[in-house]
Each structure stands twice: as structure tokens, then as C-alpha cells.
Image (cartoon, rainbow, N blue to C red):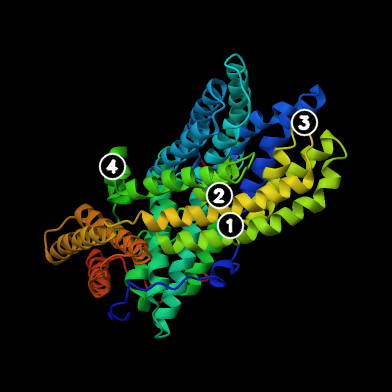
Amino acid sequence: MSSATPTPTRVRRLPVVGALRLGRPSDVWFKPALSVVAAVAPPSLLLVALGRLDLAAYTMAGSLCALYAHHRPYAARAKVLAWVVLGMLGGLAVALVTASLTRNAVVLVTVGALLAAVQKAVCDATRVGPPAHVILTFVSSATLFVPQTLGQVPGHLALAAAAGAWAWLVGMAPAPLRPHGPERRATAQALHTAAAYAETARGGEESAGARSAAYAAVHAAWQTLLAARDRPATTRRALERLVVRAEVALAAPADTDPARLRAWADAVRGSGRVPRTGDPRRDEGSLGERDELVGVAAARAVAPRPLRSRLGPLAPLAVRTALGCALAGYVSLALGADRPYWALVTAASLYQANLTLTWSRAVQRVVGNLVGVLLFAAVTPVARLGPLALVLCILACNFGAEALIGRNYWLGSVCVTPLALLVTELPGYQPTGELVTDRVVDTLVGALVGFAAALAVTDRRAGWRVERALTAVDRARERAARLAAGPASTPAALEAARRGLAAAVVDLRATADAAAGEWWQRALPQERVVLAEQAAHRTLAATVRRQGLLPDPGTTSTQTHTEDTSP
């Protein structure tokens, strides 16, 4: 079991090598990489044919929306992409109008910083991402420093809107071919992580990290399935049963066959039929409504928290972003930079859930940008062979950035940096040495000033949020324990209590991890957090047994029965 020894939180090491360590690529890295190429290429090539490549910066603003929502079910993705396009257009409109009304650099930096803070807060509150607010901030900040007139604004917005509509279509294009792809991938991830945890637990080496990762993956799978409101009931029930099996493995790892979970995960990740697991809730001979997984309909009926309540805890991050971006831009202006938005965007990209992660992102950003300017210098001779060559280099950088950024942010930045530099050449070629020098200086300014602002604006309420999460877990555990002990408890009530407790445990771990990376605060109740998690996991196991959800230990992993889940 996990140790309950409290961990000091006042003294923080600053990771450098660890921040640059490469991880495994995302399972769907190719989707945003191919999507952004498909979204950027047609508008850009059309402008090349028309001889108006100078307008490509506006179409690219809309095209970059294709980077979002690749992990969401298609019904939810349609709405999210539409809101992303509208958000992109809103930020772009503010930037274009401001640029047409004033050329005062201080005013432009101030507006850019405020836009960055709003974009950061809204994206975090709505969990839009990756790439979250960074792309929106890049577009709005860059266009602030492009000379405009009010008469040009509608046309430029129309170009961005048309490209955004095309990006929406690109994002939704896989739906007819693989309509359940996102739900399948989320379910497979839940099964894989549950198998990994069960394997370590059965081997006597139970890992708190593996358990937390597994609970988070299962919770994410449920959120994905709950968002798939319009999927056919047969498919939805089959995937839900698989996630239930993953939940059972977490509650009772000793009674779980990890190989069987992995076999299910491999099968569901493909395009064939969803494996039949059997419904552990169904008594022999039960029909009708009892075939439906209890608790899911109730979970779908729960209204999301109001946006205002989700924005409240993000106030320190928003203030950090506004202050850091503004100061970075002002310092860049004081140094004579022509493009202070590079420093502004660098600062905006740093701010993560806590200071430790913000420091790591600063290291990654600086290293990636320094290597990226060398790559830009290398590709510049090719990009300047003509407009078509420039567009092809931009497409290659777009693909490379999305293909690599899942391994580590700095590796993706190696391609993002030449991409940003090449975009500045859309209106016309500029001296390479000047671009490289300005980018290096602005990167260093943005990283140093941005991190200094993060140090100045501390999140004093991080400890309070941990206390609130502890209270939520205690209440959810007491309710689940009471229902598990009650002989008259209904299946629906037990299911809702178990699901609520699991969600509270995931939230507690995320809140504690975020608070542990915050500096200049009182010591966190790490021992209470660990003890609360252990008690919650015991209650979850008791609830699973009370529901009769434990799988048959004699069942092997070679089960081949399937069910047709065609729409």
C-alpha cells in the first residue's frame, strides 16, 4: 500500500534534465498532425494561385482550429470546434480593430496581455485543449502588430471564418468512417491502465502512481462515454460494460486477469466488433430496463457546473498570465524589438497548473526555441525558392510540431519556432539574421519575465482547495459505505455512489498534485490525502462486492464472443 508519510512542500527542486525527458507519443498524434495539414493546405495553396499569399496569415488563423477536440466524441467535437472557431474569431476581431485604431505599441501589448489572460482562463475552465489557449494567443497577439484599417477588418475576418469552417469539416471528416473512434480509444486506455495497475498489485508492488493513473483513465473514459449522447444504445452499453470491468479491476485487482483486460483493450481499439464481456449487473433471466447500466442515465442528466464557478479558482492563473505577458512585452519594447508579441506569447505559453510545471515549461520553451531558430536558418534557403516552397515548408513544420509535441513540449517547439518565423515572411522576405536574433532575445525575455511574474503572483488558495477536495471525498465515502452496508440499497443508488466516490478521488489526486507544485505556501496535508485515498479505495472495493460486480476468476483471456455494435 502507499505510504502515508507526508511530503515536504516548501522547498522545491527546479527540474532541468527531467523537464526535457522524452515520453511516449500520444496514441492519436497523427490525427492533429494530418488535420492541420489538411486544414491549412487548401486555403494557402488557393492564395498562392491568386498571388495573395500575404492574406494567408488570416486563413491560417481559422485553419489552426483543426488542432482541437480530437479526443472528444463527434457529437461533442462538433460543438467544441464551433466554439473554438468563434473564440478564434472573437480574439482576432478584437486584435484587428485595436490594430486599426492605434499603433501605440504599449497599448497593443496591454490588449494582447488581457486577451491572453481571458483565453487562458476560459480554455482552462472549459478544458479545451490541447493546445488550449496558446494558439489563440499566438493568432491574436501577432495580428495586433499587423497594420490594419477598419475597412479591411471585415474581409480579413471573413477569410478566417471561411478557413475556420473548413477546419470544422476537417475535424468532423472521420465521423462517417469511424463514428465511435474517440469512445473506443478512451475505453481501451482505461482497460490498459487498469491492467497495468492490477498486474503491479497482484505482484505485491502496488503503486500509488499507477492506481491514480488508472482511476484518472477510467474517469476520462466515463466522461467521454457520457458526452456521446447520440451514439446507438447497443454500442454505448458494450463500451460502458468494458469500462465497468476496468473499474472492477481497480477495486479488486487480486480478482482480475490483466491479460484479459489487455485483450479487450486491443480488440476495442480496432474497428471490429466490441468484445462481449457479459453484464455483471444482470441476473439470470432479467429483461428490459435491467439490461441498461444503472447510474449512467442519471449521470447524463447532471448539469455541468456554471462557467463562473469554474473560473473563480483560475483567478491567480489569469492574473499571472496578464501580468507576465504585459511585462514581457514591455521589456521587449524597451529593448527595441519590432515584434514584442513573441515575448508575450512565450510568457503566455509558460503558465501551467502550478509553479513547478511552469518552470518546466519555461525550460522546454527556451530549449525548443533555441534549437528551432537553427532549424529555421537551415530551411530558409528552401522556403525562399518561391511562394509554393514557403507554403510547403509551413505545412511540414505544422505536421512536425503536432507529430513531436506529444513526446515533449520542447521537441514540438523545435518545429513551432520555424513555423512562427516562416509565417512572418508571408507578406515578404526579411533578413534571416535579424529574425533569428529577435526570436532568441524575445524567447529569453518572455521566459525570464514570465516566470518572474509567476513567482510574484502566488496561488494562496491551493491549500484550501485540497481541504475542500478532502471533504468531498469523505462525504462521498460515507455515502457509499452507508449504501453498501444497507440491505435495501437499490442498484442505481449504489452505482451513483460508487461513481461519485471514484470521481471525488480523481479530483482529490489532481488537486493535491497541483497544490504540491505551488510554492510559498504552508505545508499541505499530504498524510491526510493518502489516508483519504486509501479509505476511499477500500470503500470502492466494498461497494463493488456489494453490487456483485466481481468477474469470474475462472474466466480466461481467450474469450472470443463478440456482439454486433453497428449503428
Q: State yes or no: discs 3 and 1 in contact (Cβ < 8 Å).
A: no
Q: State yes or no: discs 2 and 4 in contact (Cβ < 8 Å).
A: no
What residue lies at 83% left-to-right and 35% top-to-bottom?
Answer: 388
The residue closer to the viewer here, 460 or 448, is 448
> Which of the two labelled residues, at mark 2 and mark 4, occupies the earlier sequence position?
4
Disc 3 and disc 4: Cα gap in Å?
Answer: 43 Å
Q: Quadrant of the N terminus?
A: bottom left
Looking at the rendered structure, the secondary structure element under dot 2 is helix
Q: Is residue 428 left or right of residue 138?
A: right
Residue occupied by mark 3: 45
Looking at the rendered structure, the secondary structure element under dot 1 is helix
Residue occupied by mark 1: 365
The kind of residue on which mark 1 rests is: Arg
Residue occupied by mark 4: 305
Q: State yes or no: discs 1 and 2 in contact (Cβ < 8 Å).
A: yes
Q: Is residue 368 left or right of residue 450?
A: right
Label ID, residue 346? 2
Looking at the rendered structure, the secondary structure element under dot 3 is helix
Disc 3 and disc 2: Cα gap in Å?
Answer: 29 Å
> Would you say residue 394 is visible in this rendering?
yes
Rendering quarter of residue 156: top right
Up the image or down, 152 lies above or below 10; here it is above
Q: Residues within 10 Å of mark 2 (few under 14, many from 20)?
A: many
What residue lies at 58% left-to-right and 57% top-to-bottom?
Answer: 365
